[in-house]
Image: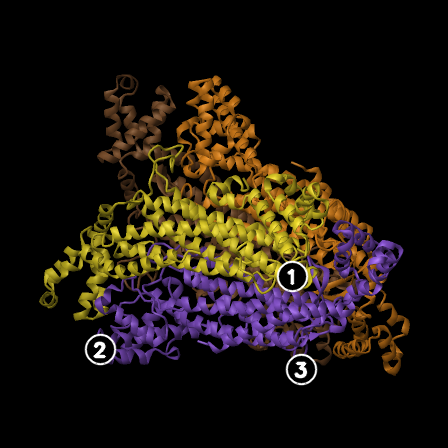
Chain colours: A brown, B orange, C yellow, D purple
């Protein structure tokens, strides 16, 4: 397997397989086969030669490890692969061997191979994003109006609803999936330029060869080579980085809500997940851990891609190679995070009682703004704010509920008492009603997200 | 001016002014004015109060430095600004003071202010991109067929043409401008959510207020607050990073071609540009320097934005603040680079004679692939490649031209001599013909880029 | 002030002043004065000229804004400064003007200026680190044995003590301060090489001039110029990054412990700190916010310095300029974080009752490992682990305390009952005793840290 | 092999093997063996059990792939390894199985394993640094006084010598090796803290166990666990990043000097190195490519380590895992770069004739400062600078040598002619003399570097 032991851990076997050495070598062979067939179709090489070459283009027929071992000295994976493939073809047909990799350059071969692998990688991410979105939409519907604390700057702030909170998780996923589709469409292109981008060896047949190859590999045909024009490619990479940021936000929230002292959410356990080697009672939020690890790593991988962009002249020195090496990590991280969150969401334990208890434990302070706004209507914002500040201090000092303290204060002040009935004041402290209002805001947004989600599903490439 | 002495140096006064403290404070006041007017329009506050508030919302009426000095302790620029504005309004109308910033939160104010500033920043970048594209398109047309070395891995490779090379500079600019437009449209949205995103203070009037504000500030109205959903915003930021990568590529090429020993291009001099305090004869490629500095710095700024994405719950702690601090640097870098390259391109000295001389100095070696391909038609690829390798070695050892060495070898080998007339061999070494073929490839690409460029110009937002 | 509005917010006025444009220009003038005096001392220029030049080297005599404005076009701050200084000197003494900046190069001037500023910056950081360490050592002593939950993977794990926990905050600060001293000593060197590092203009007098300058500016004299050898310099910068990571860890812990639902720590309030514009009851952990922002940003600034290291030949193009621009941000971030944490630590509210209550609320589960280890002595580790797993599940299901459930299970199992007296079992659940054991581990570590701290204080440079 | 196909390419088999899955698993088993032995020595577990456990701790006895496959779900590599090891031990001795991993935690196991691997990694780097330094010192001695252009801002500036230039390559290597030794000594420590750092399970025997383990594994014994105190560790990591920056600088210079049009240096060819699949004549600077790729990538890996530092409480969530995954890449990149540069330096072709020819081709302009300084002695700096600027323009316009133009100008100006004999002027243009002066500056620096180099060699740990 082509990933370090501590990277595999944070990814999925499916995604690791996409960038696996065998898969990459097979991708390169697919390119060579398509090239030979395209050149035969254009009459550049004999059809028989193309057939022999295409027949040899199977990874199991080559010594993949030897090719990789030789790549270091050669400074390119392409050179030893072409050499070995040529030898293999030569065993069947000495003439055909002369047509292997004809007129192409290493970077054509490797870039196109990466495009093919990336198409598969995007397919995996797209599918996982669909699953996660579906799961979270259902969760949001189920608990749409359940009260939960809204928290800001890591402090309890005001009451919202679970559905409302989840809109903030789902919307970036739906948008992110759409953006990935657009970025993918622009980036998944054939690379075919020959030594300096002119495909000069193939003369006038070059455009036809490129067209045939794009057809066979089902790739877009760009107007020219993009050897040192990485903008579309890196835009796609940075979109994967943005996605990991959005997944990290979800994981951050889950891990905070799953803290033992808060306990509003719990990741599913069982099946070897999240146990502790030292503490039998512990249930570690392993999915959040994976997504947080991805969100910690991917910004730097994106930065590496961006830093590698100023490539020299017609083909760069060192920066292209750096980009190649950094590219797969984005996808392995993202898919590890996504898959973990899919599983965690599907079994997520939502403790709405505890959410309510956590609200109650704050003794009404999270409704202070509401009370302040109510009073402001009659005594002005400044006075109302000052009053609530002093009432809040009493709540903390006397460990009482803001509702009681407020009712007492109103009763003691005849001008306030004249304006505000106890019922009106009490109603401000109604967590359920507050949550329902948040749920009502969430409702159309969830509907819109579901609709977009479905339309993205339908438009699958 | 709000930029460090070594950042100003790398940017433009126009872009620094966009994120200047006075501009930011004025943006915040524009938000407050729009909020008050929108609330008046919805009947939430008296029209008279809104008028007084809006009248006070002028940066010159406030002590900007005192507000900024107080922001450190408060942990927010919004708190001291709202306080000072309230005091100012109170001097005119004590009642109106109670309606300042009503129902909004610090982040609404600051995010929207950053959106307003960023709209201006994107306008500057869009305009400079237009100029640079126009200049480079003209340059590419002028020298479309002029021969120049194509270079790969920092070694001379084969002959291309100047126009062909410039396609590789221009295409990412045209694509980048289009991507920035799309990303900008998604990101330039009103932020308006109140404490936890529900705008609960304004009750049922909240949507109307938000709509009015979006109208007045000419911003998109998002379906909800995006306090901790930074994906659209960071996608825009990473596009600026991608743009700087593309500019860095141009600058890398210019700086390499401007080396004294290559001297194919020179940045314009005069007017205090690029002199050396120690060496009177030097002309430093200052524009390239600025663009390379931007390309060196911006990947890390993008990474910081991505790293700041996993924001806690309804509003984050530290990460949002980090994002704010990193944001302007992207735009100041990008505009510094763009403006420098605009100026450099406008006065770029293209020495086509030197380009030709540099080709000649390589003694025909850059045509080796062409000869090899010619011979391969009759003696096979492997033998042709080996032959050219040995001829190339003779070129180096004997310091002769590959054309002569080849003609000699053909003359000495009767089977080759029978197939290849000297004229045919000589024609492979024709730099002008090779460049014309590259120019012919460039022609439709340049036309397409020009057409897209014009259509982007027409669609100006 | 030379920092963007959202950077100033996260720093201190003292540190911003260090890299302020006036301070930088004055530093440059200090260099020029020292150069002239050194050259006079070596007989390279007339003593009278040196006196006039040194007399002119005062920032208030120059138009700093004009110099900065001109730096963009020149591609260097040095060129316009030298020009203006020469004009100023010429007004007093036309001959002396000819000796301004004699034999030096822009980078000598600017690098040395940055060294001088950085020395002041390190002084501020060193002093703040001393204060923070002292405060935290006192806090650790005061609450050395107070029980607090140890938490792993964001879940309650086992009981430790406050003093033990604080060792983990303090040790990296003490080590970090020592490392900064070492790195500073290596990096704070005179830069003096002339155009290409050979100081050729000054001939045999060059070494003497450099020695004089180093003396006057109290800087180390390096064996040669380090124009494109940035390793010592960037090592210092990365140490500032490491420090911010250590501060971020403290801030992460504080912010987690200050969550409303945990409430074991609170940052001090009052004096305009941490209020909320929308919620009167809130106390935001503003110091943590600043330190977290610094920890979010500085990794990328360090990366930019590292990325700028491969500078071309004798003086780089773009990368040196990028380094200059990124440098000050490391120090402004670090000092903002440090100062905030100093203030927060000094007034930190430590609620040991709440710590105990949070332990109690977990119903003994955090002692499960202890019980398991006790039982393992007689029934083996595997059986003991399994038993505790099942008892822990009962605790959760029945909402009872693990102590009771365990006592019950032991009573019901005659073989266990024979071996473990109820008192022995009960003692495992003693949070105070557990904390005391952690405190005993902390004691020598705190003593050692205090001793190192004092020795670092004494060795002040 | 545990590295992606495009990372292996950029590293060495030796370094990849260090972090290979089998090596990591063996390292973990070494830890478990040492733990069991240490506990037996302290009387915590039976000696027989320790013997069985230690006997089972061999990677070839475990199914490494199955362990890694299970690690994803478990969220830790330690859990499945301990499980499989326990099963293996149980087959021999059911009782002994109960003592496997007793009282330790996953992170103790994995951190210590990484320390062991990193010690080997540092050994490889130290050895390669020694080789590279030795080679470059010899090269610098050999060509100490050979003239070469000093280049600044990618423009020819003045003449230096090869030895002088190489001081700038070597000094950072010598310093870097010393810094790595220091950082390694601080970072290569046993990790042993148990669940929350207190090693509570082992009671009073804990310190003894830790001491025994440190002895057996030949690691430093830290004062306490460093689970979430990563400052020493990350300081080491950033030093590897700094080293790659220094290697990148060397590679940048080589690749620039190896450009076909400059051709002063060439990397060795042959043995499959640096060929081109399309162009038989090309010799690509493959070693520079590898080192530049490393310098492009490692800044971001360092940034990831720094970003992962603020780890939560007693053991972090996601950030530790991110650090683990990013760590090996630093070393694989660095060793790939180092090894490539070792080989390239050993066979580096230094074309001193071409260096001289490149100086000559600049028609004396690189001596303009010297002439200016000469004239300044009699006509003042300002007039001399202006005169040389105009003479330089004539050089360019008339394509003549500055020497001739200057002699002409002096002859035409009686006051200059009176002061400056033609010989004196001509001597300024003596490249050899200039280079000798640079060589004289290099001489003591090279001697000092050689001495430090030898002393580092002797102090091998």
Q: Are marks 2 and 3 on the same chain?
A: no
Image marks 1 and 2: residues in contact by CB distance under 8 Å: no
Does residue C210 appear left or right of residue C257 in this picture? right
Residue D385 % position (x, y): 76, 52
Quadrant, the C terminus of chain D: bottom left
Along the line of sight, the residue nearer the viewer: D38 or C5: C5
Q: Disc 2 versus disc 3: distance between alpha carbons?
A: 64 Å
At 27% from the left and 38% from the top, the residue drawn is A360
At 47% from the left and 31% from the top, the residue drawn is B81
Along the line of sight, the residue nearer the viewer: A282 or A430: A282
Along the line of sight, the residue nearer the viewer: C210 or D178: C210
Does residue B247 appear left or right of residue D223 in this picture? right
Q: Are marks 1 and 3 on the same chain?
A: no
Residue D443 % position (x, y): 63, 72
Question: Label 1, on which residue?
Answer: C206
Dot 2: element: loop
Residue B9 % position (x, y): 63, 46
Answer few, some or many: residues within 10 Å of disc 3's Cα (few below 14, many 20 plus, some between 14 and 19). few
Q: Disc 1 versus disc 3: distance between alpha carbons?
A: 70 Å
Dot 3: element: helix
Q: Are marks 1 and 2 on the same chain?
A: no
Pair 1/3: label in front: 1
Pair 1/2: label in front: 1
Q: Disc 1 versus disc 2: distance between alpha carbons?
A: 73 Å
Residue D276 sits above or below residue B344 on the image: below
Answer with the quarter of the image where residue C111 lies.
Answer: bottom right
Residue C14 is marked as none
Residue A91 is marked as 3
- Residue D157 appears in the figure: yes
Residue D223 % position (x, y): 32, 64
Image marks 2 and 3: residues in contact by CB distance under 8 Å: no
Question: Label 2, on which residue?
Answer: D46
């Amino acid at each position: 397997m082509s990933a370090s032991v501590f990277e595999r851990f944070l990814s999925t076997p499916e995604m690791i397989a996409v960038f696996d050495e065998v898969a990459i070598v097979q991708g390169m062979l697919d390119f060579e086969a398509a090239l030979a067939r395209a050149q035969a179709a254009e009459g550049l090489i004999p059809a028989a030669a193309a057939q022999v070459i295409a027949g040899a283009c199977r990874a199991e027929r080559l010594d993949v490890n030897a090719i990789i071992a030789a790549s270091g000295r050669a400074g390119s994976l392409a050179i030893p692969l072409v050499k070995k493939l040529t030898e293999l073809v030569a065993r069947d047909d000495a003439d055909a061997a002369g047509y292997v990799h004809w007129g192409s350059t290493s970077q054509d071969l490797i870039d196109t191979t990466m495009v093919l692998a990336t198409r598969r990688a995007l397919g995996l991410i797209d599918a996982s994003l669909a699953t996660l979105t579906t799961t979270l939409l259902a969760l949001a519907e189920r608990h749409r109006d359940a009260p939960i604390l809204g928290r800001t700057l890591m402090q309890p702030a005001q009451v919202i609803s679970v559905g409302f909170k989840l809109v903030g998780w789902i919307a970036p996923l739906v948008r992110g999936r759409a953006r990935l589709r657009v970025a993918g469409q622009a980036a998944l292109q054939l690379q075919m330029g020959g030594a300096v981008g002119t495909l000069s060896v193939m003369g006038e047949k070059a455009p036809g060869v490129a067209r045939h190859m794009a057809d066979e590999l089902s790739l877009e045909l760009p107007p020219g080579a993009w050897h040192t024009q990485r903008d579309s490619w890196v835009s796609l990479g940075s979109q994967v980085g943005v996605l990991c940021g959005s997944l990290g936000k979800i994981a951050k929230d889950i891990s905070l809500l799953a803290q033992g002292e808060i306990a509003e959410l719990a990741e599913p356990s069982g099946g070897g997940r999240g146990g502790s080697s030292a503490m039998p009672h512990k249930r570690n939020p392993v999915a959040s851990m994976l997504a947080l690890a991805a969100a910690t790593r991917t910004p730097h991988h994106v930065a590496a891609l961006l830093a590698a962009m100023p490539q020299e002249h017609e083909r760069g020195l060192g920066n292209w190679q750096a980009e190649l090496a950094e590219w797969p990590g984005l996808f392995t991280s993202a898919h590890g995070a996504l898959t973990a969150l899919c599983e965690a969401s599907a079994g997520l334990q939502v403790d709405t009682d505890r959410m309510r208890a956590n609200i109650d434990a704050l003794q009404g302070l999270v409704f202070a703004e509401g009370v302040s706004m109510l009073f402001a209507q009659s005594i002005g914002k400044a006075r109302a704010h000052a009053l609530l500040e002093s009432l809040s201090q009493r709540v903390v000092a006397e460990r009482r509920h803001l509702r009681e303290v407020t009712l007492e204060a109103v009763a003691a002040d005849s001008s306030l008492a004249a304006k505000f009935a106890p019922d009106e004041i009490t109603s401000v402290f109604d967590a359920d009603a507050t949550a329902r209002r948040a749920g009502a805001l969430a409702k159309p947004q969830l509907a819109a997200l579901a609709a977009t989600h479905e339309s993205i599903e339908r438009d699958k490439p």
